Image (cartoon, rainbow, N blue to C red):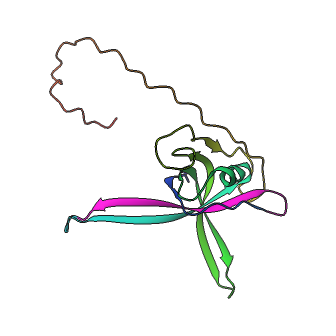
Amino acid sequence: MASVNKVILIGNVGKDPEVRYNPSGGAWVTLSLATTRNWKNRETGERQEETEWHRVVFNDRLAEIVGEYVRKGRPLYVEGRLKTRKWQDKEGRDTYTTEIIAQEMQLLGGREGGGGGDEGGAGGYSRGGGSDDMGGGRPAARPAAPRPAPQRAPAPAPKASTGFDDMDDDIPF
């Protein structure tokens, strides 16, 4: 049976990214991305907020693009997959880290990350084929295709009543 491992996040960058290079020359960046969930407490009526921090890894050309354009506080769209790594701490204990291995990234907000409307500062990038480890493969960066302006459909011609005219149109598909 087939399986899917896909993560989509939109959040704010926790600190300025720092590009690092492995011995074979491949670039990589690890950054924290904050996503916030808001809701109203049913018992007290009070607004609640919960922020979750996600560890995101960018490799190769995508890492270089992140290092050049992404700054602390900037909203970012990330697509990738989950990966859990096992490593040993200084005391020799096994430690596990779950991270998102980014495959696509989209800069959101204005040019300097002001978070306002899109003033042309958005760009989409993705990894080409290659391996996921830090340094393998040849990634490809591609700008996001421009989105065409929405077009209005012409008004439909009046139809004869089918008996369904008074039903709600809340069907989500």
The reply to whether residue 1 is visible in this rendering is: no
Residue located at (56% from left, 51% from top): 78
Quarter residue 26 falls in: bottom right
Question: How far across and how far down the image is residue 27, in percent?
Answer: 76, 57
Please tell me whether residue 141 belongs to the stretch shown in magenta: no
Q: Residue furthest bottom?
A: 91
- What segment is highlighted magenta in the picture? 22-41
Q: In this rendering, would 71 be left or right of 114?
A: right
Q: Is residue 19 left or right of residue 122?
A: right
Dividing the picture into quadrants, the one containing residue 152 is top left
Determine the residue positioned at 42% across, 60% down: 36
Q: Quadrant of the C terminus?
A: top left
Q: Reply above or below: 92 against 154.
A: below
Can residue 86 be seen in the rendering of this structure? Answer: yes
Decide which of 119, 81 is in the foreground and name it. Answer: 119
Horizontally, residue 143 falls left or right of residue 8, namely right
Residue 155 in the image, given as x and y percentages of width and height: 30, 15
| Helix, strand or loop for the magenta stretch, by majority | strand
Question: Residue sitting at 62 percent across and 78 percent down?
Answer: 95
Q: Residue at x 57, y 48 (%)?
A: 112
Residue 39 in magenta stretch: yes
Q: Position of residue 109 (x, y in %)?
A: 51, 45
Residue 64, position in %: x, y? 72, 52
